[in-house]
Amino acid sequence: MKDYYIYYNNNFVRQRNATLSVLSASTQFGLNVFEGIRIYKEDSFYVFRLEDHLKRLNNSLHQIGFNTEIISKNEFLNILRELIILNNIKTDFSIRFTYLINEIDSWSSNKQPVFFIAPLIKERNSSDTYKTMALTKTKRISSSAMDPKVKCGANYINGRYALLEARSKGAELPLLKNKDGFISESSGACVFLVKKGEFLTPSLDCDILESITRDTVIKILLENKFKTKEKLISEEELNESDEIFLCGSAAEITPIKLMNETDFKIGDLTKFIFKEYQLAVTDKSYKDFSWTTKLDV
């Protein structure tokens, strides 16, 4: 992996020089909150749904008890512009924006967090990208126990357990149910079904992340007059669907071709939302939503 410049603790440093104690609260207990933000390169750089990511990160900061306020949009963009220049970035990439405790402490720490902003080269999905998936016995964490709406490192261990189970079944990705037995989400991505021309996705009370990409997909579908429902989805309804795809900042739109040894077609409606999503993130369509922030370097 290339030793990129990152912004850490108020300085631009090489990744190898961004250090913290092995006994820090974040290293030991996953005490951090973060966002993954996508930047797409066309004639300029386009940051996708930046305000929404910053708002969600600020909410996560408060919910986990970090006593700080997030940096402003303009501060973020100034740091981002400098990182693009320092690293000579000329393609699509993503940003990991994380607040953490870098001092020796425990999970109960009330110390002031620091943050880093780190670029990761990540090109957009190709139209022939797909994954296989397995429904797992591992259940999704409950909102009443560890709120999945908070993007913190510790919450993602739930997805890791499910991923290990899915891989043991020969699949690439997991699909989790919630404690009540309804479909919830994958590890790091939300799920949509297509059934008889209608789009279905688990509702927010199914212990899912309040996904920005999920919200984008729903708005695109409604803008194009597709029937779209947020609802409780049973395993039976999952098995009866015609198409399945995942969505997320990292996943973008990822079709599922095999689920629990059942083949699913990558149908016209999945291909449609794949195409429309790419138009949205690159500021070629859906401009009225003001989803992109143009950044000239």
Image (tube, rainbow, N blue to C red):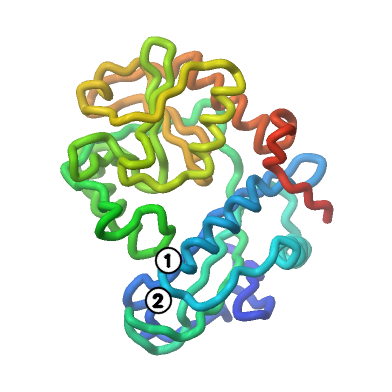
In the image, taking residue 197 as reference, residue 260 lies left or right, namely left
Residue at the outermost left position: 137
Which quadrant holds the N terminus?
Answer: bottom right
**Residue at disc 1, secondary structure:** helix
- Within the image, what quadrant is residue 3 found in? bottom right
In the image, taking residue 261 as reference, residue 37 lies left or right, namely right
- Within the image, what quadrant is residue 291 found in? top right
Q: Which mark is residue 63?
A: 1
Name which residue lies at 36% across and 25% down. Answer: 257
Q: Position of residue 228 (x, y in %)?
A: 46, 22
Mark 1: give few (<14), some (14-19) or many (20+) Cα within 10 Å. Answer: some
Q: Position of residue 151 (x, y in %)?
A: 43, 58
- Pick the front one: 200 or 15: 200
Mark 2: give few (<14), some (14-19) or many (20+) Cα within 10 Å. Answer: many
The type of residue carrying mark 1 is Gln
Name which residue lies at 74% across and 30% down. Answer: 284
Q: According to the image, label 2 marks what residue?
A: 26
The type of residue carrying mark 2 is Ser
Position of 98 relative to 151 (above/below): below
Which quadrant holds the C terminus?
Answer: bottom right
Disc 2 versus disc 1: nearer the observer: 1
In the image, taking residue 277 as reference, residue 231 lies left or right, namely left
Q: Position of residue 19 (x, y in %)?
A: 51, 82
- Pick the front one: 246 or 166: 246
**Residue at disc 2, secondary structure:** helix
Q: CA distance from mark 2 to mark 1?
A: 16 Å
